[in-house]
Image (tube, rainbow, N blue to C red):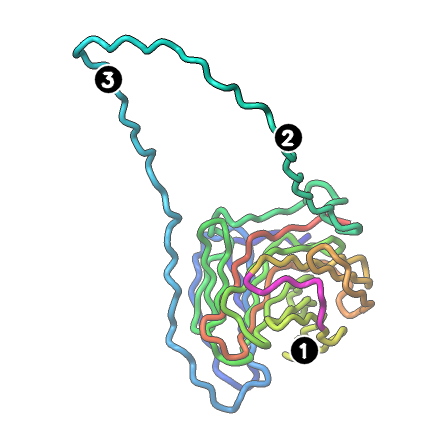
Amino acid sequence: MKKLIPVILICLMLTACNFPTAKLSSEEVVQTNVALILTNAPETTLLPDGTQEPETPENSSEDTPVAAIEPTSGEPAAPEPEPTATEIPQPTATTPPTPTATPEPLAGDPVTQLGAPDFLDEFNSAERWAYEDDWFLLTVSGGQLHAYSKGTPYWSSWYTTHPETRDAYFETTFTRPNCSGKDRFGLVIRWDESQQFYYMGVTCDGTWGFSFYTKDNQIINILDYQSSDAFKPAAEPNRIGILAKGNHFDFYINGTIVGSATDDRLPDAGTFGFISMSAGTVNMKTSVEKLQFWKQ
């Protein structure tokens, strides 16, 4: 494992073009990596205005006071009437309520088998993650990481963090409230200093694939994008996971294994995180609830 350094490494790669720059705090204690790549875009693209969806604090309400009824003095109470005979109702048979079935955990779901994770981030702090430039925005609020691709078509942005890890089951849980079509979000693993990494990408229209990103800014699909019934609607929480062991990879959607692959291009440990790409949706948003891994 490489020694953590107190400066964020910002990697901005775009062949034969000028690069944007962004200043980040030198007080960061966890190294992160950001790279923004323009691929398959039209020759001219209009960058949207840098906008940020306002984050609103969670509603809070104070306890509502309950008025106490104080005893009061007054006229004596009237005498209670004499009891009269009343017909006692006979008990009637009732049907007990039908118990609600609890969903059984999926057989083979790694989360139900691996115990406590070796790494867990539930985004209670923005210390690792806060970032913004002309194409990409990360904020943390309400126990979620909010990632915005601002709308330049096919501009991919990724952000990774330590520790460097090789063999593990990596998983993230997220929602995509305003995506459409081929807007894409993914889980990055084994990012290295040569700017190469693997990622499992998922599109808003319900497909997934596994890709290798090269140091020459090329995307090689190891598994082509394919549909899966394991997805829930994009606006609902979905879990995606990669079980990485050496050159073998298994892929999970909501606890169901959906495919496997073998690849030898990146045999070493690397950092992990997310990739986001808008196919044209302005401020395409992904809200990440959890990022975790279990070493293998």
Q: Secondary structure at mark 3?
A: loop
Q: Is residue 100 left or right of residue 179?
A: right
Element under disc 1: strand
Residue shown at the point (59%, 60%) measured from the top left: 160
**How far is disc 2 from disc 3 in space, using C-alphas?**
42 Å
Residue 28 lies in the magenta stretch: no
Where is 265 relative to 289, above or below? Answer: below
Residue 280: x and y, percent? 50, 79
Give the residue type at disc 3: Glu
The residue positioned farthest toward the left in the image shown: 74
Residue 157: horizontal and vertical position, in percent? 55, 70
**In this orientation, which residue lies closer to the viewer: 154 or 28?**
154
Q: Residue at x 65, y 57 (%)?
A: 239
Q: Which of the numbered marks, if any, corresponds to residue 100? A: none
Give the amino acid type for the residue marked by disc 1 in the picture: Ile
Residue occupying image coordinates x 20% and y 8%: 76
In-front residue for pair 8/94: 94
Earlier in the chain: of badge 2 and badge 3, it is 3
Residue 93 shows which numbered tag? 2
**Eye-nearest disc, 1 or 2:** 2
Q: Which mark is residue 70?
A: 3
Q: Which residues are magenta?
A: 227-235
- Say few, some or many: other residues with alpha carbon within 10 Å of mark 2 (under 14 / 14 to 19 / 20 or more): few
Q: Is residue 282 left or right of residue 272?
A: left
* Location of residue 167 in the rendering, given as x and y in whole percent from the top left corner: 76, 54
What distance separates the C-alpha of mark 3 from that of mark 1? 75 Å
Q: Position of residue 100 (x, y in %)?
A: 65, 42
Q: Which residue is mark 1?
A: 219
Q: Are marks 3 and 1 in contact (CB under 8 Å)?
A: no
* The magenta stretch spans residue 233: yes
Kind of residue sitting beneath label 2: Ala
Please identify the quarter of the rendering in which residue 273 is found: bottom right
